[in-house]
Image (cartoon, helix red, strand yellow):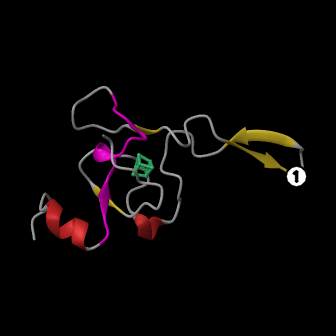
Amino acid sequence: MSFFDQESHRKAGKVFCGECRHFEPGFTAKGVGFCALTKSRTVLVRETNRNVPDRQGLPPDPNPDSGYPVCFPMAPRMCTKFELAK
Ligand code: SF4
């Protein structure tokens, strides 16, 4: 199976950030982009009672088994937050 065999990936439950309505393209056509869901996400650290940046622009799920740690428009990944762009 080739890397760009998108149909095979879709059958395996994989999606592509580049087709997601949450994806914000980077500066180059096939480069890294951003996930709008986490772009300004923060998390409260109880010990300090402060909000700190949390995966800003990166995929929401940090699980390494779910794909790449960044958003590539044409790289297959598992993502429960994927929504097809119209
Ligand atoms: S990480 Fe998920 S929600 Fe974010 S752009 Fe990619 S597919 Fe969409």
Q: Is residue 13 left or right of residue 41?
A: left
Q: Is residue 14 above or below residue 59?
A: below
**Badge 1 density bin: few <14, some 14–19, many ≥20, Cα 10 Å:** few
Is residue 37 shown left or right of residue 45? left
Q: Where's residue 17, x and y in %?
A: 34, 48
The image position of residue 7, as x and y in percent, is: 15, 64
Q: Report whether 39 appears left or right of 68.
A: right
Secondary structure, mark 1, is loop
Query: Is 43 drawn above or below residue 24 in the view shown?
Result: below
Query: Would you place residue 74 above or below residue 31 in this image?
Result: below
* Residue 23 inside the magenta-drawn segment: yes
**In the current view of this chain or complex, which residue is farthest to the top?**
27
Along the horizontal axis of the image, is 3 left or right of 20?
left
Residue 19 lies in magenta, yes or no?
A: yes
Q: Residue at x 31, y 58 (%)?
A: 15
* Residue at the (16%, 60%) spot, across then down: 6
Q: Quadrant of the C terminus?
A: top left
The residue to which callout 1 is attached is 46
- Can you tell me whether the CB of the residue at mark 1 lies under 8 Å from the nearest atom of ligand 1? no
Q: Image quadrant of residue 49? A: top right
Please state, as top left, top right, bottom left or bottom right, where the N terminus lies in the image.
Answer: bottom left
Q: Which residues are magenta?
A: 13-26
Residue drawn at (53%, 42%) of the image: 37
